[in-house]
Amino acid sequence: MLKVISYNVRGITTVMKQLLLRKWLETNPNDVLLLQELHMTTQLQLESFKRSFPDYSIICSLGTWSAGGVMIMIKIKLLIVDAGTDHCGRVAFVKVVVNNCPIIIANIYAPTQANERCVFFENLHLYIPSSHWILVGGDFNCVPEPAKDRLQQGARVDRRSYSFLNSHVLQPLSLVELFRSKYPHSVVYSFHNDVNNIHSRIDFFLGTNLVRRNTQHIAYIPIGLSDHDGVSITLCLPPSTISKFHRWICNTEVIKKPSFLSRFQKIWDILLQSSDFNGLDWWSDLKTSLTLLLQDEQKQMVVEARRKMKELQEHYRTVATNPSNDDLIEMATIRNNILHLLIEKAAANIHGYRERNAQTLGEIAKSRLSSTRSNQSLIHFLNHPSKGRVDTIDEMLDVATNYYEDLYREKPIDVSLWSSLFDGLPKLGVQDRALLDCEITVKECLDALRSMPDGKTPGDDGIPTETWRVVFPLIGSQYVKMLNIAKEKGRFKPDFLRALLTLLKKKNKFDGQMKDFRPLSLMNIDYKILSKVLSTRLRKVLGNIIHQDQTCSIPGRAIHDNIYLIRSIIDYQQRIRDPIGLILWDQEKAFDRVNHRYLVGVLEAFGFGSEFISWVKLLYANGSFRIKINNSISIPISFNSGVRQGCSLSGGLFIISLEPLLHRIRSNQAIPGILPPGGQYSNIRQVVLANKNNINPDHVRIKTIAYADDVNTLVRNKDEETATIAMFDLYNLASGAKTNSTKTEILWVSDWLPPPCFESKVNCDWCTFLGIPINTTGQLPKSELERKISNIKQQIGYWSQINLSLTERVTVLKVFILSQLIYWLSLSTVPKESIMELQKLILHFFWLPLGPRINFRTIIGHKYNGGFSVPHIDVMISSLRIKCGLQLLNLSRPAPWKFFALIDTAVQLRQYAPWVWFNLTPHRESGNTFFHEVASHTTQWLKAGGKLTSQNNEPSIYWQLINRQYFRRPICEVRNPHLKDISFFRLLRESLPNRQLDFWLLLANFGIHTRSRLGHNDISRQCLLCPAVETPAHLFINCPILVGLFDILNNRIQSICGHKLNKAIMDVVYLKEILQMSPNRLTRRNMVFLIGCYLHTIWTFRNVVRHQCHQHQGLDPSIAARQFLAATKHLPFDNG
């Protein structure tokens, strides 16, 4: 089957209309969509549209001065072999292959002027290739039979246009008008001008006789986004013999249905009576039953969701055939109802009625903004080792299968080297070993399940975390029993260990090489529960056996420690003019090459107990995965090497496997490293290394700096490099790892001595350490900072295309735009002028398109204090420096970078922390280094009464700084002190959707400009709805045109609390007495919700009048009343 829909959309450039179209398409599945009159004129608009519909391939002829543009949207599952457009925005065609059948589909938007239309039809056949299967649809702006296809009293009928169409297109291409050939006597209209009572059938399909014979269904359907109806045609095509993989993923809304849990309980009761719980087969039976139940509930949910739309469409078709005048009025009502239903579905798709959260905005980002990443997993071709470029699915699967079979094949290792590699490794303590080896409990599994984030893509079985969280309380004890039985038998069922491997492109430029993909293992949640329990236990003991120079996956250590240390070494060595090199080692596919026998051997060398090792063996024995490429999937491939990057246990296991290498480097006397300043003194070592006694000075020498597989070592000459390479070679032979020498590089730090002749590539400018560019003076390179700011400008430009509320803009700033920058700011010094530029960018984006309406020092405040939580970059940097300073002063947190930090911070901090001062090392009182900034900000913090340690119930350092030094109370709270008593801003935030919330906050703070404020004379100050002066009090309280709307509001308020609302701005906008009417919290929130909708409705209606230039005539206040009633149809807090 091939379903094609043609629709004149009358403009599709706004985000809201695109969202409504998407909701309609979800309710009405299709394969091809033909859109006319797009009003889309720029490539930027087209790219934005494509990002909104990533599941479609799009062919578009953009609009011009003479035409609105046409577009063909084809599901990406269909193969496009040819496509073309005209240059005027009137024709687009595509040739697709469906079930091995080539079909030409053309989209037409004919001119509205008759003479232009005839000329257009004369040349139209030149754009349509010949074929047995031709389907031409669109808006032809003429009717085949005026008597049946047009209702327009007294108008002159254009008979010439369709005659030209027939003689120049239909006859030469052997086409017929498909609807009339199927329904010769039906009277149906596709265009409706209800104001002038004009109705006509100007949208239709033309097709060859082969298309006509295979037309299963053709009908006009209401869509509701314009004054046209859509035309839908379903073609019956020859069946395909090629089967495609369909990945089912459970819709998490299913578990909210009351019937789901009761039906699952019945299934579980049957399994309890009939299953053998001493084996493993029952678990497969349970998952199969659960999957079938979820699929059935999901199907019923979809059917229910489509039922209402289908009823409206069927009723529309009934009244649209041979319609009377009353039928035409009813048709308009149905189209309006469909539009409201689409708006309702679009709103329901936004998580959180009052605020789109970061996850939802992230989905918008994926679909709209990440044009280079939106199709990261879509692969068009791969490079075959012998055939070159291949693009058929079988050949691409063959390339991927061979590559990953080789990558995950067991790597050869030399076991005889283990004794020298493992020599001197620390042993796990008795208590730690007992912790890891104890029995797994139901509580641990449930806690692990609850700690997993929502919204993550599930594994091969398609069952997400949210579903398991609902059913696990019922099955938890039997799940744990199943794990123990599997351990006794020494194996799990194959589907328990199977993963789905998805391939994500690493780079924007893709050349078909398999190494350009990042493999992501999607593990089943039942597997992830066990791995999460084990990883939670492992994290508690890792710090006791892993040296402090490895900071990944260990509580109390962070990636920041590495950057602090690297920059400190560079700065210190440069200052004392002692040349040194930092080697950035590149290990090829480090996580994927770990030999499983080696992994078990290193666990035994560290003294792990037999129970924990058994669990690791169980999870890694007989593991397999399948590769997903586009709509196809490979055969299962054995997983015989590496740690799974989709498994929570993988990080801990990898750093354990890597630790012998780091230990050998630390123990090698031929690799001296550096002794940090003060490291030779025991009292300084005790402060820096958390009061650990009897630490030999040689043990504090810095030789390695590691975060997972990002390993850096220190080198001064060729001999030290050779000794380090020998340690890597030993590790590679023993573990199966491989060093990529071509990507390994050295940052040489010296302004007077050139680097020796190293084997590795040498860089004397700057290198990137863990995502932070650092030059040979320890600073952020200016060019990289400029690039980062330029990237932020680009992101702001992308997000500016989306219609967001002020609150949502703050979320976007924090989560999507500034997150990476904050990481840079926390680790690098940034010039003041760059900070000011960033702050201006933030404010510009926040206020688009209004311009500033509230004082900057107010909007940076917390949202419950009347602000918007707009990021203040300078304060953010201060809080980050203070946080670093407090870590420095924390005696329970050992970190080698503190040796260096004391030199620049002790002078300023010794008054508040005397233990940082030592006469044994030199100190620098002033400078422009990172740690001088840390000392300055931390000193100010402590001087102002800040604490060395923060309590859990205290605001963060950032908010304490904002509230102490910068925040200015909103002007409305200053003028109306009662707002603080009623928690005005908290109440608004908890009660209102974002749009109404933004408007009310601006109105309360005098940020809404009525004409009385902007006008210079009586006319310009006059209300748009009546002759009075437009003040806020007049517009929202006293305007006679809208008095009926206030009465509706008052009636709703009275029905809730039994009291009436005073007709005064102080009560309506500032709630001076209204909240005293009811102490009930839910009632108060409902009243605020009603008033917020009332205020926003009036302002929306007023702006519509202003833009449409209505002046006191033809105003219909019932429109505003209907909008208000629609917005408040369901009170959001009736059930708490």
Image (cartoon, rainbow, N blue to C red):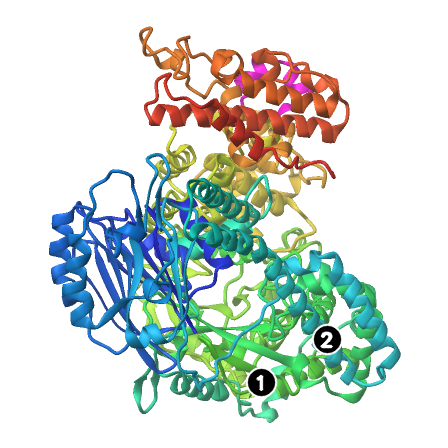
Q: Quadrant of residue 1010?
A: top left
Instruction: Inspect the image, locate mark 1, and give the three-letter code of the amino acid beneath it.
Output: Phe
User: Which percent across, then down, holds residue 500?
Assistant: 56, 76
Alpha carbon of mark 1 to alpha carbon of mark 2: how far? 28 Å
Foreground residue, 606 or 486?
Answer: 486
982 inside magenta stretch: yes
| Direction from residue 850 to residue 1073 in the image, left or right | right
User: Which percent across, then down, holds residue 97?
Assistant: 33, 77
Which element carries disc 1, helix, strand or loop?
Answer: loop
Q: Quadrant of residue 281?
A: bottom right
Foreground residue, 579 or 1038?
Answer: 1038
195 inside magenta stretch: no
Residue picked out by circle 2: 289
Labelled pair 1, 2 in contact (Cβ < 8 Å):
no
Residue picked out by circle 1: 639
Foreground residue, 689 or 54?
Answer: 54
User: Which percent across, then down, holds residue 309?
Assistant: 53, 53
Q: In which quarter of the image is residue 415?
A: bottom right
Which element carries disc 2, helix, strand or loop?
Answer: helix
Mark 2 residue crowding within 10 angstroms, few (<14) / some (14–19) / many (20+): some
Q: How many marks?
A: 2
